[in-house]
Amino acid sequence: MELHDCLVYLLAKSSQAGYRFWTSYISSYNVTPVQAMVLILLNREDGVSAKKLGEQTQLDSATITGVLDRLEGMDLIIKKKNPADRRAILISLSEKGRNDAKELDELFEKAHNDFLNEFTDEEEVQLRTLLKRVLETHKYHLFSK
């Protein structure tokens, strides 16, 4: 099999293309794609636990902690103790973070549509269905380190 025909290669290169595409949309915000994803999630549901954000992003606790520390250092989020669980913290958007997160969420929709503008609606549904199936089939590899 030729390298360029290998599905793993195609998935990796497609992922890189999507990452670069999304990065070009958010570059003026000085955040990474992962940081933008967290801000978008907080825009949709503010005041959630770090654990929930980790689950939603499928990032391990050390990684999500680092992302949140950087966002806090950029004054985009505020960490508060969870009154219901002293061991947990709740993550909220700061005023600046709220503005940026709202704009990033709107950009997310635009980027999604622009990224797939060469696909028919049917092709987009097929692609999404197949990618979800790949993830479901191989999800045990995600956290098997």
Image: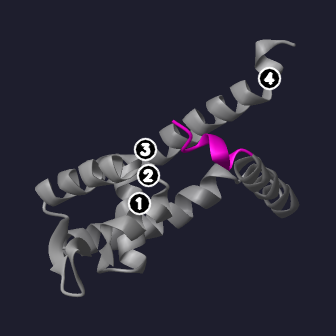
Which element is circle 3 on?
Answer: helix
Q: Earlier in the sequence, mark 1 or mark 4?
A: 4
Kindly identify which residue carries mark 2.
59
Q: Which residues are magenta?
A: 138-145
Q: Earlier in the sequence, mark 2 or mark 1?
A: 1
Which of the labelled discs sits on residue 54, or is there none?
Answer: 1
Kindly identify which residue carries mark 4.
6
- Mark closer to the observer (2, 3): 2
Q: Amino acid at mark 3?
A: Thr
Locate residue 52: give its quadrant.
bottom left
The answer to whether 132 appears left or right of 18 in the picture is: right
Can residue 31 be found in the magenta stretch?
no
Give the crowd class for mark 2: few <14, some 14-19, many >=20 residues within 10 Å.
Answer: some
Query: Label 4 to label 3, Cα distance in Å?
Result: 26 Å
Give the crowd class for mark 4: few <14, some 14-19, many >=20 residues within 10 Å.
Answer: few
Q: Position of residue 55 (x, y in %)?
A: 47, 63
